[in-house]
Amino acid sequence: MSTVLHASSIHWPKPVSITSERVIQGTPAASTHVLFTDGKTELGLWRVSPGEFSTVHQGYEEFISVLEGEGELIHDDGSRITLKPGTVLILENGWSGRWSIKSTLVKSYAIIRL
């Protein structure tokens, strides 16, 4: 059996504001559409509006493929990853930095909890 989805036609859950202690700029809000989870692995789509906010990947690794939008991931050491459609990356356990979203971004993701 196959599941085919198009990010533009998904019925997204209501966006949730990024918690204020993480927000650096703007009023970013995110919505997650989980496709599969078994407690250790989670697959899905995530959409976030423009703004900048901090993040820490603790206890999991994440594979990301950007489908729509633009922005950057800025590591705490100052290194930057440009986010645009076609960008594919892995954020390892312990990665910390910030998302800087210029236009609403949609990513597909796979999380593996350690």
Image (tube, rainbow, N blue to C red):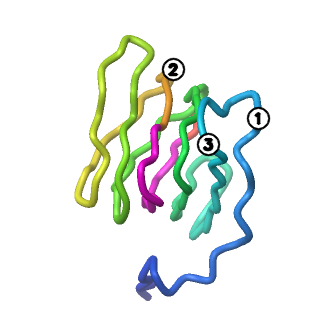
Say which amino acid is labelled 2: Gly
Task: Give the number of the mark in front: 1 or 3.
Answer: 3
**Residue 109 marker:** none
In the depicted structure, whether residue 45 falls above or below residue 72: below
What segment is highlighted magenta in the picture? 100-112
**Residue 94 marker:** 2
Marks 1 and 2 close (CB-CB < 8 Å): no
Q: Earlier in the sequence, mark 1 or mark 3?
A: 1
Front-most of 21 and 102?
Answer: 102
Percent position of residue 87, x then y:
25, 51
Magenta includes 107?
Answer: yes
Percent position of residue 85, x then y:
27, 60
Q: Residue at x 52, y 43 (%)?
A: 112
Element on which disc 2 rests: loop
Percent position of residue 79, x then y:
30, 20
**Residue 20 marker:** 1
Residue bearing mark 3: 26
Q: Quadrant of the C terminus?
A: top right
Residue farthest toward the top in the current orientation of the protein: 77
